[in-house]
Amino acid sequence: MRDKDNQMIYNIELMLIKIYESIGIDTPENHLDILNFVHRQVFGCCFPDSYDQRDVAQAFKEWTERKDMKKIKKHKLW
């Protein structure tokens, strides 16, 4: 089980790096935070052998949206 989880994390990391490259950014300093969040999201909704780039992209989108909401609430723009 642990090997499959490590392989899933590795694959998700590769997919995240492709996303970063596709939007023209370097790997962010908080990459590990993003990776952990995305892994939890994908692991929670997909079987370890049935996720793909779309699942990772959706989880990354959710991470960015949550970060935006925190900024909005912090600055009382909401």
Image (spheres, rainbow, N blue to C red):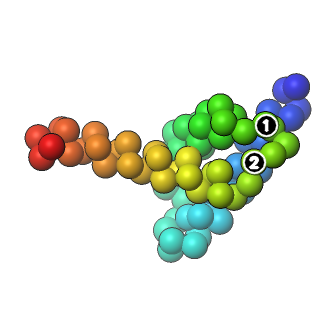
Residue drawn where x is 56% and y is 47% of the image: 59
Residue drawn where x is 65% and y is 65% of the image: 18
What type is the residue that disc 2 sits on? Answer: Tyr
Distance of mark 1 from mark 2, alpha carbons? Answer: 7 Å
Residue 22: percent from the left, percent from the top?
57, 73
Residue drawn where x is 48% and y is 53% of the image: 61
Viewer-proximal residue among 13 and 53: 53
Q: In this view, does 17 lie to the left or right of 67?
A: right
Q: Quadrant of the C terminus?
A: top left
Q: In which quarter of the image is the N terminus?
A: top right
Residue drawn where x is 65% and y is 31% of the image: 44
Q: How crowded is mark 2: few (under 14 residues within 10 Å), some or many (20 or more)?
A: some
What type is the residue that disc 1 sits on? Answer: Phe
Q: Mark 1 points at which residue?
A: 47
| Secondary structure category for the residue under label 2 | loop
Viewer-proximal residue among 73 and 29: 73
Q: In this view, does 39 lie above or below 23?
A: above
Q: In this view, does 19 lie to the left or right of 50?
A: left
Residue 38: percent from the left, percent from the top?
59, 42
Image label count: 2
Q: Are marks 1 and 2 in contact (CB under 8 Å)?
A: yes
| Secondary structure category for the residue under label 1 | loop
Viewer-proximal residue among 68 and 55: 55
Q: Looking at the rendering, which quadrant does residue 53 occupy?
A: bottom right
Q: Mark 2 points at which residue?
A: 51
Q: Is residue 48 left or right of residue 41?
A: right
For residue 43, say whether it is visible.
yes
Q: Looking at the rendering, which quadrant does residue 75 occupy?
A: top left
